[in-house]
Image: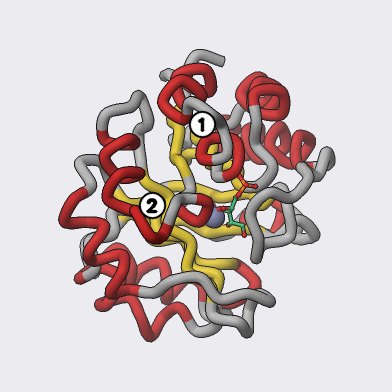
Amino acid sequence: MHHKIAPSLLSADFLNLQADIEMVNNSEADWFHCDVMDGTFVPNISFGFPIIKQISKMAKKPLDVHLMIVNPDQYIPVVKDAGAYMMNVHYEACVHLHRTIAAIHDAGMKAAVTLNPHTPVCLLEDILQDLDMVLLMSVNPGFGGQKFIERTLDKVSCLKDMIVRRGLHTLIEVDGGVNLETGKRLVDAGADVLVAGNAVFADANPTEMIHKLKSL
Ligand code: DX5
Ligand code: ZN
């Protein structure tokens, strides 16, 4: 299967979101990646559910919603209502992760667990079979445009091994500092979905950059 590209709207032009959504609609991108930050789980605040609901009305591709917030459980119906296809919750923010994942599925969404750079993939041993996707952070979450953490490549290989050994089809997504160079190495290591914010939206030709990332 060819890998997917999920441009992160965190780096889009918030004063002209319509133009950036249309650019992604007409590109080879597969998903929209939407970053929600609460100023508590991460030291930054981005945008919330009313904005995502507006985005979903115009987006022609599935919304991959990455929640960098405490207590994501309490927002499951709101995230569904906002139009999310995939709901990503952080491992570090969920005390009862098994219950959270079941509730996301019951609400009719795909479920993903996100790991911060310091959280080992082996902690997923007893939940992996219930997940549609694992999102590995390759920067400390909170900001776009940060430098890729090299150690993520080993985590991708290790996680791929866990997935294959169990005969699962769980997707591996990577988020943070993805560009043509790190993206190529991630795909070779087994990543199925690349999130890219700065690499896409700071480029002079975002559509062409998405094409290049898709062609890796
Ligand atoms: C970081 C966010 C990312 C961010 C990635 O906290 O989760 O999705 O937008 O941005 P780049 O690709 O610029 O590192
Ligand atoms: Zn993200």
Task: Give the residue drawn at x 22%, y 56%.
Answer: 56
Q: Nearer the viewer, mark 1 or mark 2?
A: 2
Residue 175 picture location, percent across and down: 60, 46
From what the image shows, is residue 12 above or below residue 159? below
- How many discs appear? 2
Task: Pick the residue in front: 90 or 159.
Answer: 90
Q: Nearer the viewer, residue 163 or 140?
A: 140
Residue at the outermost left position: 57
Query: Percent x, y for residue 35?
Result: 48, 61
- Is the residue marked 1 within 8 Å of ligand 2, measured from its CB? no
Within-10-Å neighbours for mark 2: few <14, some 14–19, many 20+: many
Q: Where 6 sits versus 181, above or below?
A: below
Q: Amino acid at mark 1?
A: Asp
Q: Where does label 1 land, which residue?
A: 192
Image quarter in which the C terminus is found: top right
Give the residue type at disc 2.
Answer: Asp
Q: Dot 2 corresponds to which residue?
A: 64
Cβ(mark 2) to ligand 2 < 8 Å? no
Which quarter of the figure has residue 186?
Answer: top right
Image quarter for ligand 2: bottom right
**Residue 131 placed where, x, y %?**
45, 53
Q: Which callout, 1 or 2, points at the residue further toward the start of the chain?
A: 2
Q: Residue sitting at 55 percent across and 45 percent down?
A: 197
Crowdedness near tag 1: few (<14), some (14–19) or many (≥20) residues, C-alpha within 10 Å? many
Cα distance between the residues tagged 1 and 2: 14 Å
Q: Viewer-proximal residue, 73 or 130?
A: 73
Q: Quick one: SS at disc 2?
A: strand
